[in-house]
Image (tube, grey):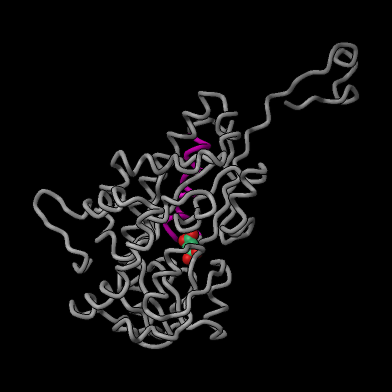
Amino acid sequence: MKLLPFAALGLAAAISAPVALADDPVVIKFSHVVAENTPKGQMANRFKELVAEKTGGAVVVEVYPNSQLFGDDKVLEAMLLGDVQMAAPALSKFSRYTDVLALYDLPFLFQDLDAVDRFQQSEQGQAMLDSISRKGLIGLGYLHNGMKQLSSSKPLRTPEDAAGLKFRIMSSEVLEAQFKAVDAAPLKKPFSEVFTLLQTRAIDGQENTWSNIYSKKFFEVQPYITESNHGLLDYMVVTSKEFWMGLPDEQRAQVNAALREALDFGNQIARDKAIEDKGLIAESGRSEILELTPEQRAQWVEAMKPVWKKFEKEIGADLIDAAYAANTTDNQVASATDGQ
Ligand code: SIN
């Protein structure tokens, strides 16, 4: 609520009490690290439009892409301090807040996004959104980016090809173990530094989705991309309890409805972009896309699968079983060596 100084109100007002103008809008700063032409970038921009429509301008979303405001390493701390109200970090970036989300980093756990959807929509998948609530944060929903591929300065066809190479990873112990399992050297680095690290050859490779490899131009400095589909890069949209519960009920419901619509929109973009951006990379001729034979793929699975056991206690064997079972539908039996 803004109060006008007496001088600005004229004589009549000046002799009465200060006059209240219409309330200032509630501002949601939405910080993210990727480009705007990505599933998360598009989702955030759509969310901004929908919130404006549904709240009639009473809530305003300001979107800050490309790590302009905060990197993923700082954004959750900033949220707890009230400096930012919403973000959607990769699920790999919550290790300081909960153990269970590490599930999503296990290599070769999900065959495709349909399996991921089945698990995330299940009771267990939904309960995982609450895993950060003890820390003052609320998980509002999942967003896909897609399956990860391996890019490198040399062709990677078998796990032996990765031995001795340096790979940038997100801040996750599971991802660290995954690269150590193939005798590679993992380095935890912020997303904003990856292009330069690759360009200067400070690292040899990285893992990411087609949309991130395309939008951040990693393909221009990585001559090979192995279509491994070995892991998942998904997000959790988060806010702080203090901010969320401080919204009036009606506004919270409107913002939540806008988010549901924006997430559906973003999830469709994720599916489309995995195909489109892979095609654009192939067309560019800057990077060769390598397909694995079933035998080669089985070798990667065999080398990386022991990581599941290593994290079974932390994550929970039941949860791992439930997630893996989501690969199976009534008409189909899944195997960890199946291709995507
Ligand atoms: C993101 O998609 O938000 C960033 C992923 C990464 O850090 O590799």
- Where residue 233 sits, quadrant-wise, is bottom left
Q: Position of residue 99 (x, y in %)?
A: 45, 51
Q: Residue at 26% x, 72% y: name it.
A: 301
In this orientation, which residue lies closer to the viewer: 124 or 72?
A: 124
- Judge from the rendering whether residue 314 lies leftward or rightward of residue 301; answer left or right: right
Q: Report the number of discs.
A: 0
- Where residue 277 sits, quadrant-wise, is bottom left
Q: Residue at 41% x, 50% y: name it.
A: 100
- Judge from the rendering whether residue 85 lies leftward or rightward of residue 104; answer left or right: right
Q: Residue at 49% x, 51% y: name it.
A: 88
- Judge from the rendering whether residue 335 lies leftward or rightward of residue 89; answer left or right: left
State whether residue 43 is above or below residue 67: above
- Where residue 148 sits, quadrant-wise, is bottom left
Does the magenta portion include 48? yes
State whether residue 273 is above or below residue 134: below
Q: Position of residue 337 (x, y in %)?
A: 20, 69
State whether residue 177 is above or below residue 284: above
- Judge from the rendering whether residue 240 lies leftward or rightward of residue 172; answer left or right: right
* Position of the C terminus by quadrant: bottom left
User: Bounds of the magenta span?
Assistant: 36-53
Residue furthest left in the image? 331
Magenta stretch, overall SS: helix
Q: Position of residue 49 (x, y in %)?
A: 50, 42
Q: Residue at 45% x, 84% y: name it.
A: 165
